[in-house]
Image (cartoon, rainbow, N blue to C red):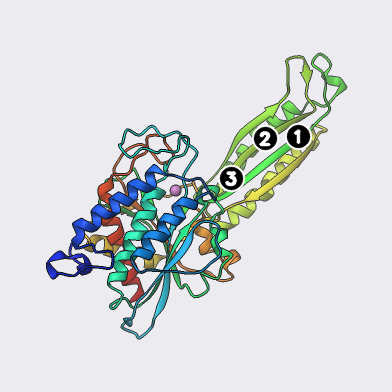
């Protein structure tokens, strides 16, 4: 992991723009920034101080910030002056998400969140710091860098649509490939999870309002009870994955909210359900929406009730490009890291919007890797904690992956 970042090697006597000499100083610097970001977490679209701090640190290092009118988040750019072996000069991007979660932190660390009820429980403080570290390293090596790297510090990932704020700008117009990464507390520091193909799921959300006719609890024959209708709908929805989706395709549906009634002797007029559908395959996503609608409407009609469905589609599935995944694996191993197959997740990440044809008008190859942060509490847990010794190796890995990818 150590050695390639000659801009930071004290023995060579080089000092970068920030006055940092050598890797230990860079590591110390990044850890200090990480602790600051962890101490002052901000929720989705409220990342004002976070953005100001990122801007300050990058500007201090002489790194250019693109003048986009973003309320929060920013895009920085490092322009290399080298040329790839084939003479080309590409532009690549690295996405780092920056928002925190509404969680009361329980981790016992000296740099615990000072904003009670807000916490970097998804490791986005690591994403920010490793992204800054990679930018500093590549800035130092810009003479050898065969193209341009855009560093996207993205707001609102936890809202699953923050990427769309960035995509309102023209930042991706000249980007050929995009990289993303996530903290992974299921692996030790030094372990990188990587996989070709699908890694995170498409995230859809639904709401169902069952409309019956309310009446006395003793006279259900006077009305249409929405509660057994809702119960039948829940049963029906759960058969879609087993009866309609190819058994080799990862997919699921969860009903996560059921609400009806106010008391024991009144049959309510309405019942409300909410839930989520997760799919990897594009066709399964379409199939699911169709079958949910048919199932809900059919069951409601069978009971003489009506049902209203709202369908909200969020991030599509993330598909890792094969060549990029292989390159990442090679670079990680050359950095002394161990690679393991990345766990597929039916969780989502709006990173996928950057690659999607529907949002971009063209398909942009991308790769989303998992950086082991030390085995511990899962992400979104109040005691989730990133081991700080991962910060420098993560920054070095990202910088090296980007540098090598420019040569491809
Ligand atoms: Ni996250």
Q: Which residue is pictured at 45% across the width and 56% down the height?
A: 52
Q: Residue 3: name its quadrant.
A: bottom left
Task: Give the crowd class for mark 1: few <14, some 14-19, many >=20 residues within 10 Å.
Answer: many
Compute the Cα span from label 1 to label 2: 8 Å
Name above or below for residue 54 compared with residue 205.
below
Residue sitting nearer the eye, 91 or 208: 91
Q: Which residue is mark 3?
A: 277
Q: Position of residue 359 (x, y in %)?
A: 59, 64
Q: Which residue is mark 2?
A: 273
| Residue 343 in the figure: left or right of residue 212 | left
Q: Mark 1 or mark 2: name the one nearer the start of the chain.
A: 1
Q: Mark 1 or mark 3: name the one nearer the start of the chain.
A: 1
Name above or below for residue 234 compared with residue 100.
above
Residue sitting nearer the eye, 132 or 338: 132
Q: In the rendered view of the protein, which quadrant contains the N terminus?
A: bottom left
Q: Are marks 1 and 2 in contact (CB under 8 Å)?
A: yes
Compute the Cα span from label 2 to label 3: 13 Å
Q: Position of residue 376 (x, y in %)?
A: 32, 38
Q: Which mark is residue 210?
A: 1
Q: Are marks 2 and 3 in contact (CB under 8 Å)?
A: no
Compute the Cα span from label 1 to label 3: 19 Å
Under tag 3, what secondary structure? strand
């Amino acid at each position: 992991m150590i050695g390639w970042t000659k801009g930071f090697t004290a023995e060579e006597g080089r000092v970068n723009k920030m006055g940092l000499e050598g890797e230990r100083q860079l590591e110390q610097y990044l850890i200090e920034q990480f602790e600051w970001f962890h101490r002052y977490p901000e929720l989705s679209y409220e990342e004002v101080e976070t953005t100001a701090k990122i801007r300050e640190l990058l500007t201090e290092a002489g790194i250019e910030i693109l003048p986009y009118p973003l309320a929060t988040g920013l895009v920085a750019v490092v322009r290399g002056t080298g040329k790839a072996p084939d003479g080309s000069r590409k532009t690549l991007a690295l996405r780092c998400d920056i928002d925190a979660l509404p969680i009361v932190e329980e981790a016992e660390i000296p740099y615990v969140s000072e904003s009670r009820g807000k916490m970097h429980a998804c490791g986005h403080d690591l994403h920010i710091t490793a992204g800054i570290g990679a930018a500093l390293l590549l800035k130092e090596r810009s003479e050898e860098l065969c193209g341009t790297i855009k560093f996207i510090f993205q707001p609102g990932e936890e809202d699953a649509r923050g990427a769309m704020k960035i995509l309102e700008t023209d930042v991706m117009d000249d980007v050929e490939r995009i990289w993303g990464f996530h903290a992974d507390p299921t692996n030790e520091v030094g372990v990188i999870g990587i996989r070709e193909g699908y890694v995170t799921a498409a995230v859809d959300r639904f709401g169902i309002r069952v409309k019956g006719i309310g009446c006395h609890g003793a006279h259900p024959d006077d009305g249409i009870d929405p509660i057994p209708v809702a119960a039948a709908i829940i049963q029906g929805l759960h058969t879609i994955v087993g009866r309609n989706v190819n058994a080799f395709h990862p997919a699921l549906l969860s009903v996560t909210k059921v609400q009806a009634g106010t008391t024991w002797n009144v049959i309510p007029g309405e019942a409300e359900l909410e839930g989520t559908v997760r799919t990897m395959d594009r066709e399964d996503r379409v199939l699911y929406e169709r079958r949910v609608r048919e199932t809900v409407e059919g069951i409601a009609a069978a009971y003489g009730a009506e049902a209203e469905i709202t369908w909200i589609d969020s991030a599509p599935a993330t598909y890792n490009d094969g060549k990029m995944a292989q390159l990442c694996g090679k670079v990680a191993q050359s950095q002394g890291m161990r690679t393991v197959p990345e766990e597929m997740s039916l969780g989502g990440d709006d990173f996928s919007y950057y690659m999607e044809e529907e949002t971009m008008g063209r398909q942009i190859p991308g790769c989303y890797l998992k950086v082991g942060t030390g085995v511990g509490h899962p992400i979104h847990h109040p005691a989730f904690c990133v081991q700080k010794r991962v910060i420098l190796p993560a920054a070095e890995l990202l910088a090296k992956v980007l540098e090598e990818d420019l040569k491809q």
